[in-house]
Image: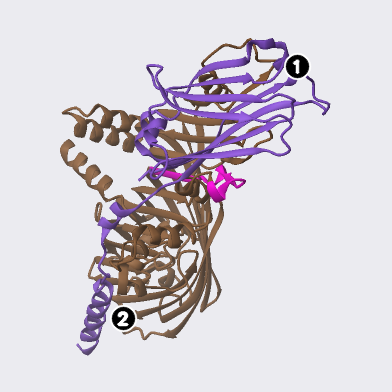
Amino acid sequence: MRKGIKLIFVIWFGMHALYAQNKQLLYDFNEIPQSLMLNPGVKTSEKWHVGIPVLSGLSFQAGTSGVTVNDLFADDGIDFTTKVRERVLDAMTRKDDFSTTNQIEGFYVGFRGRNRPDDYYSFGMYGETDIIVYWPKDLVLLAFEGNGGANIGRSFDLGDLNLRGEMVNVFHFGVNRKLSNDLTVGARAKLYSSIFQFQSIHNSGSFRTSPGQNNVYVSSIVADMQLQTAGVKGFYDILDEDTSTTTKDLTSLFTKRVLLGGNLGLGFDAGFSYNLNPQTTITASILDVGFIYNSKDIQNYTLRGNASTEGITVFLPEDINDVNNDLWQELVDDIEETLPYEENNSGYISLRPVKVYGSIRYDFGEANGRSMENCGCGVNMERGGGKSGIYRNSLGGQLFLMKRPRGIQPALTGFYQKRLGRTLSLKTTYTVDKYSWTNVGLGLNLQAGPVNFYILGDNLLSYRNVADSHYASLQFGFNIISWNDN
Amino acid sequence: MKGSRCRLLVVLIFFLFLFNSCSEKQDFDQFEDLSITPTLASGIFYLESDEATINAAGDVGVFYVQTINFDAFNEEFVAERLLEGTIQYELENTTTKRIGIAIEFLDENGDVLDVESFIVEPNMPEVFTRDVFYGPGGRSIDILTTTSSLRIAVGNLSDSTSVSTTSDPKIKLSSGAEFLFRLK
């Protein structure tokens, strides 16, 4: 049993690859139980649901607002260094980023209250990895071109270094309540169990080499930089030891961290759905308003201070008696003293990346009764709700906002949803964000008896050449769903 | 029945569309061809002396000599990656003295690898510059990569009594370098 659990965790860990934070296809796709994770106040209709462990919700995404794989690695005969210079160094800015997120459900269960049928309770566990690295333009230029030549006099911005990442296991419990025929609200409490976290998000400073006042060149640096890590050193030490028990030790540490043995945090989600009229619904939700207090396995690195040097300087007669021949080492020591690189173990609080969704949906094309029999239009219709859910078509728009280290990252989506009888529902989206202006997505929800299967694919136009895509995302999952007494 | 077939068709088309992705041929081995060769610039050594100090040394001639440990070039990381470089010297003399300067590049045994010498005329109207190139077509790059210390000697080739009428007369030696490295 213990081995089985570990195996699941190892698979889970290995599958933490790439997925989308913005799940515009899943949002308000209320035939899919996982839509409750994006809006605790979504209209729920099922009596209960059980996600098939590990397979109920998998989503992968990778995004780059700058260069694509194809831009660099296409077999086009162009010199690789030239491609890097023209398509990366000259084209990308400090606002571009590489991001990757994934989420995998360990388990996910929901049920309607026996005594309060308007309440739908859900709980579960999922793992999430979220990493974003902004393009450190000036630092890359410094490495690529150096501070000499045409860069004499140029100030390199050390604040271009900006990255953040974490892997976290989330235990959650949510309540969804239908307050009236028109209003459904919900909230979800979350307990975060951090596996690792790192961030370097408030850096500032500059490095500049210019003609000196005395000597040929003067190099000046002002730095206020910090990299905070929690939970990283433990894994690093195990890998560094490289013993025969490395795999076992890694698995053991990972399992411990997943099961609340690492740094912990708290958070919540909240949301609502409101019928403006029988055919128009607005929804909104806010997710991951929370924090993790990082106090265990902390290793922080700082570089703070300022230094300026023109090289070894000798002024006569002042230095006539200075016969020390270690002037170079003295110079290096002076710089290290005024610009110390230090390590510390101070705890810190990391905020979860808050996400906000909003949508407006217009339903039309009323279905006949037969085609919607046994459709899962349960509580929100049966109990006198509006006709939402029995319309064949929905048209609307969605807004997604996400807090990133350099500000709010927005995405705007238009969608159309088509319900084909009681078993099949399709949703297509067009999304505009910093990664793509041609993001067309397609989602399918299939209900075969109690078995629910969904698959949602984003940016389908890029499938013509996946390597040239700025953004790729895929979500899918299996659930067992029961409506009423079916 | 007809509806079921229609739905089945929709599902099939959906999956065909979703998984019928393709990609142009990619060659990830190109990364090996990446060339990163930054040019690094730095001030190296600056010496300044007033005329009074030169006169105070009397007829000895050499009024400043110093050997300085200088391992910046022969650090393993630097030595392995240094492709070429130029050391730029700038000399300024507003004193009445003719000055001789010798900069010796010494290896770790103290043996002289190279010498850079200057004779600086008195009351120079403008800054004298000299660029010394190390690398292909220039002096051997090994001079730099094996240099462990610099010996700098500055001597007065004139009398030790004359005084310039210019304000704050000085001899100044500046030096800086630009080196081309191969990081990858």
Name the subunit of mark 2: A
Please state which amino acid type lies under the numbered disc 2. Gly
Can residue A26 be seen in this snapshot? yes
Residue A204 location (% of width, % of height): 59, 41
Q: Are marks 2 and 1 in contact (CB under 8 Å)?
A: no
Q: Which chain is purple?
A: B
A187 left or right of B175? Answer: left
Residue receiving disc 2: A421
Callout 2 secondary element: loop
Residue A105 location (% of width, % of height): 31, 52
Residue receiving disc 1: B52
Q: Quadrant of the N terminus of chain A?
A: top left
State which region is magenta: A149-167
A176 left or right of A481? Answer: right
Residue A164 on the magenta span: yes
Front-lying residue, B133 or A190: B133
Q: Which chain is brown?
A: A
Q: Quadrant of the C terminus of chain A?
A: bottom left
Name the subunit of mark 1: B
